[in-house]
């Protein structure tokens, strides 16, 4: 019997990015769900309990940083690996790694996304 497909939650305010990542992950045997802002993303993460989350940083409504903190503070999602996907630079990576309220995300990818590296990272985090 096939193991159940791992579930990835994609949180991004750009629908083309969601479509792109959804297609990519689906093609690689994952189940995907998505949310278009941080607030909705945190809600969906708690409801769906995904195996991994990709999170955009610059979004309206609620920033990715705030969403990351909420995910880390929630009992249901605090151990879910989060990969930040962002157009923001390495300075931002240094910034987030110095924050006291959030621990650094498990992965960090700049847009445009290197799909092979992203897939490799997801598999590494999910131990598959």
Image (cartoon, rainbow, N blue to C red):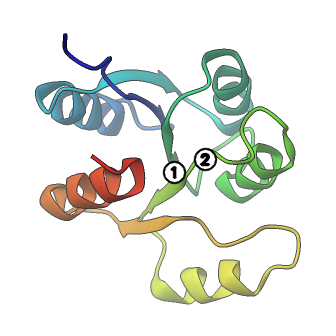
Left or right for 28, reference 119: left
Question: Regarding mark 1 in the picture, which secondary structure is present there?
Answer: strand
Q: What residue occupies the far top of the structure in this picture?
A: 1
CB atoms at circles 2 and 1 under 8 Å apart? yes
Image x and y of residue 79, in percent: 68, 48
Quadrant in the rendering for residue 94: bottom right
Choose between 5 and 41: the one closer to the eye: 5
- Which residue was labeled with disc 1? 56
Left or right for 78, reference 127: right
> Any mark on residue 27, and which?
none
Q: Residue at 68%, 38% (x, y): give it.
A: 38
Q: Residues within 10 Å of mark 1 (few under 14, many from 20)?
A: many
Left or right for 124, reference 46: left
Q: Is residue 11 visible?
A: no
Q: Residue at 19%, 15% (x, y): give it.
A: 2
Q: Residue at 28%, 28% (x, y): give it.
A: 22
Image x and y of residue 123, in percent: 28, 51
Inter-mark Cα distance, 2 to 1:
7 Å
Q: Is residue 126 visible?
A: yes
| 22 to 69, vertically: above or below | above
Question: Regarding mark 2 in the picture, which secondary structure is present there?
Answer: loop
- Which residue was labeled with disc 2? 59
Q: Residues within 10 Å of mark 2 (few under 14, many from 20)?
A: some
Quadrant in the rendering for residue 62: top right
| 96 to 125, vertically: above or below | below
Image x and y of residue 99, in percent: 80, 79
């Amino acid at each position: 019997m096939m193991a159940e497909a791992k579930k990835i939650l994609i949180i991004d305010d750009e629908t083309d990015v969601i479509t792109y990542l959804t297609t990519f992950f689906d093609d690689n045997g994952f189940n995907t769900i998505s949310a278009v802002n941080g607030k909705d993303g945190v809600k969906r993460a708690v409801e769906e309990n995904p195996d991994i989350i990709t999170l955009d940083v610059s979004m309206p409504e609620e920033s990715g940083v705030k969403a990351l903190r909420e995910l880390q503070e929630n009992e249901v999602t605090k151990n879910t690996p989060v990969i930040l996907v962002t157009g923001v630079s390495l300075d931002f990576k240094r910034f987030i790694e110095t924050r006291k309220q959030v621990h650094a995300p498990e992965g960090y990818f700049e847009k445009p996304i290197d799909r092979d590296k992203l897939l490799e990272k997801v598999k590494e985090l999910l131990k598959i």
